[in-house]
Amino acid sequence: MEIKDGLNSKARILDASIELFTKNGFSATLIEDIAKKAKANKALIYYYFNSKEGILDYMVQELLKTASFLAVSFIRENIVKLIKSSKLEVKNDQYIFKDKATKNEYMRQIKEYHEKLYNFAMENRIIIRILLHESCSKTRTRNDLFKLLSLIERDDENPIFRALTNEDNTINYSDDVVLFKLFFSYIPLIYFTVYYDDYKKATGATDEQARKSFLQSFQTVPFHWYND
């Protein structure tokens, strides 16, 4: 099959899918509905995505790919550099800094990283809403939110874990750290983006006020992981 104007066709299919998944739910949306909304035939949808599940898989993988890129970039530009310069050592999940100035600079950098994560999540909050709705549905056929675990798995297939252990193979997150990162880091960010509009309506907060309040809470870390 020769595909003309492929990028536009694919984008139309994704946009139509997002709109219909949001309005009707993933389970209730049919390929025929997507094709009609996108003004594309079903064969074109199957060419790009194989199935309706394939469309959602693509959305999830794009989210994970970007989240992974942000994390790996932060690790290489900050943690790896500090380890190489002997300004940081990681022992039993604790980050031990050479001096207070190094720790302060690291905390400044991690705040910038959190801001990037926040911006990324807000830009994709419609897709995140779809994933959360599907994960909570009584008729759910999948739970894509737990694919977030792939970002914190202690596995060489995980680029984030590999970026850390390639530099220092003594780093090995404990089960406590994995649980914390999932339920007290990623999940709160997900829920905030999903209920962002409702939160602003209920509190009267501006975009900047909501952003500032969330980041102040999000940047609260278990300080026993960092030496004084």
Image (spheres, helix red, strand yellow):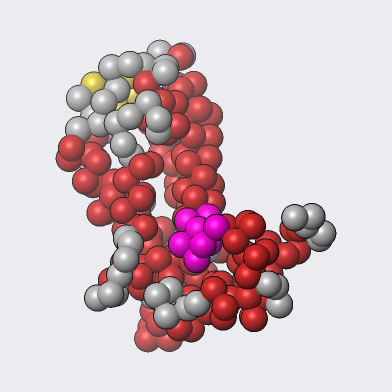
Residue extending farthest to the right is 4
Question: Is residue 92 found left or right of 9 in the rendered image?
Answer: left
Which secondary structure class fits the magenta region best? helix
Q: Where is residue 31 in the image (x, y as percent from the top left)?
A: 54, 73
Q: Which image quadrant for residue 136? A: bottom left
145 vs 114, left or right, is left
> Where is residue 152, by image quadrant?
top left
Residue at the image position 47 percent from the left and 78 percent from the top: 29
Q: In this view, does 214 lie to the left or right of 49?
A: left
> Which image quadrant for residue 79?
top left
Give the magenta part as a residue range: 50-58
Left/right of residue 45 with respect to residue 213 in the rendered view: right
Q: Which of 204 and 160 is in front in this view?
A: 160
The N terminus lies in quadrant:
bottom right
Seen from the viewer's position, the closer of residues 207 and 139 is 139
**The C terminus is located in which quarter?**
top left
* Residue 142 pos. (x, y %): 33, 62
Q: Does the magenta stretch include residue 2?
A: no
> Which residue appears at 38% of the width and 42% of the height?
151
At a point 55% along the width and 58% down the height, the residue shown is: 50
- Residue 7 seen in the figure: yes
Please say whether residue 55 is one of the residues in the magenta stretch: yes
Which residue sits at x=53%, y=35%?
A: 73
The residue at the far left in this view is 176
